[in-house]
Amino acid sequence: MNLIELLDKSAATWPDKPAFIEGENRVTYSALATQVHSIAAVFSELSLQPYSRIGLHFPNSIAYVELTFALWKLNVVVVPVPVEGTDGEMAEIVESLQLDAIVSPTPRSNSIQVQPDCHLTRYARNPRASHHDLNLAFIRFTSGTTSARKGVALTHETIRDRVVTANKALEITSNDTVIWTLPMSHHFLVTIVLYLSQGATVVLARHVLATPFLDAVQRWRGTVLYASPFHYAMLAQDKSSTAISTVRLAVSTTCAISEEVAREFEKRFHLPLSQALGIIELGMVSLNSTDASGRWNSVGRPLPDFEVQLLSPDETGAGELAIRGPGMFDAYAAPWMPRELVAPDGWFLTGDIARFDGDGYLYLLSRKTAVINLAGRKVFPEEIEAVLNRHPAVRESRVYGRPHPHLGEVIEAELVLDGEASALDSIRAHCRAHLASYKIPSRLHIVTELPRTSVTGKIRREPVAAV
Amino acid sequence: MTDVREIESSLLDFMRREVFAPDLELTAETDLIASGFDSMSLVRVLLFIETSHGFWIPQGEINAETLKNIRSLAATVVRLRA
């Protein structure tokens, strides 16, 4: 199967319906499919090998979507490369995921123009990445520890299964208009692909301010909002009288929402925020579409297609969340490790500590992993520590998330220095050169030693208190 | 007490370093949104203000007027700090 079939089917069913609205530009399903096939025809002249891996280094746009489907049509594996990354971060994705080429809106040295504002740069490399006899469509890069596996690989069939499963809870139809704000390089499959498979209209409204966002909801009669708690906090404090009564579902994703934002948003718009649990290895596992008002802090009942258990529960019933179901990832990409080895009996261990209430609603309590969630962006402490530790004045470092009332967590670092404290400015400059700006620690603390576990001597990673 | 010019200059420094591409000629009057200021940029700037001035600007204060440019943002910091 190929995901282009989902788009072709929508184009045949709803040819004149807008698939995308961006500013004053409306693109119908028919026009979108025509453009995708025409881009695919241009790419096919470039002799891209099936299952070659191509990085997509594009900002949010209709072009982003067209390129993804065009590459899929040619059985190319699409790898999103976030535009906010530094050159070093991009090089790491190219290297670790063995990309064959990258497409971007601006030319690079040795790039060839595919069409206006689309340039392809090939990387000469040998040997090419194997596709392991899988019908791969997509690899999401995940930076982790040096020992962790980078990249989550998904086949066309897996993505289709995720879309079908998630829509049992989202219930998106061709009557829906989704107001979209999040970066496509981080959110695409059970969102954009799902909406397009159901004939919905997607309004690209990536506004930083509340007023233009609400205006877009009103103007286009939005029915579904999909945003992060940070966006909802902005909207909750809107002082205008703009109503968004057409909206039936406001999905909050990427990190836990605070009670204050949940309550204020509902009070302002008479609409509760539905928290979703999305996991890159699994897709959308849970959505609180049935009691978002009463249980604002629950991610809802897990979708019926998933089996869920809590491992080693404590006396309160809280345990590690393990999940089994459709749409599970096919492999970790680098180094390659197929799902069957990661989850031999089909159970995926999420690393989240969770509990159920008496009615089967799921609550996330904490994580076993040290990943930091800054306003919805996942940040791996080991990645930042590796950069810090390369600075000559840093002997060692520990990076952690400090709870923050408005952002979930913020990034801080403790440093043991070999040099003078005056090196801090140079360390900050070093971070700016090597890390996307949101990954730069907001505070650097100089310490004489790092907390370590008494047994293994590893850096301790237990939660840090809020200030 | 830090005056508005100093705050303006520290915001300008910060945004030149950490928010915008180095080739953008950023001044206190540059239109931020038109220059590509997005919600992650806002997260960074609100955190910078919190770290350097000790308070969080409520997101309800962030609108087209206050986020027009660095001058209006610095004036907002001074007004809310008072």
Image (spheres, helix red, strand yellow):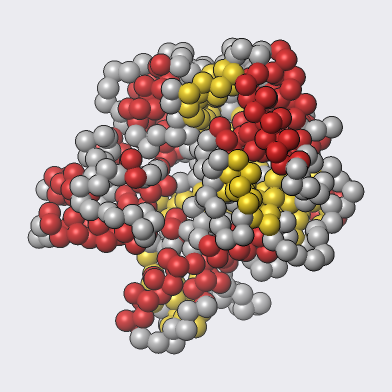
Residue A45 shows up from this direction = yes
Residue A141 shows up from this direction = no
A342 vs A390: above or below: above
* Residue drawn 65% across the image and 77% down it: A455
Q: Point out residue A175 in the picture as x, y percentages from the top left corner.
A: 59, 12
* Residue drawn 51% across the image and 56% down it: A85
Q: Point out residue A305 in the picture as x, y percentages from the top left corner.
A: 77, 29
Quarter holding the C terminus of chain A? bottom left
Left or right of A246 on screen, residue A82 = right
Left or right of A452 on screen, residue A50 = right
A235 vs A290: above or below: below
Q: Point out residue A359 in the picture as x, y percentages from the top left corner.
A: 64, 26
User: Residue A364 versus residue A42: which sits nearer the camera?
Assistant: A42
Quarter holding the N terminus of chain A? top right
Left or right of A24 on screen, residue B28 = left
Corner quadrant of residue A244 = top left
* Residue drawn 67% across the image and 35% down it: A39
Q: Residue furthest right?
A: A133
Corner quadrant of residue A231 = top left
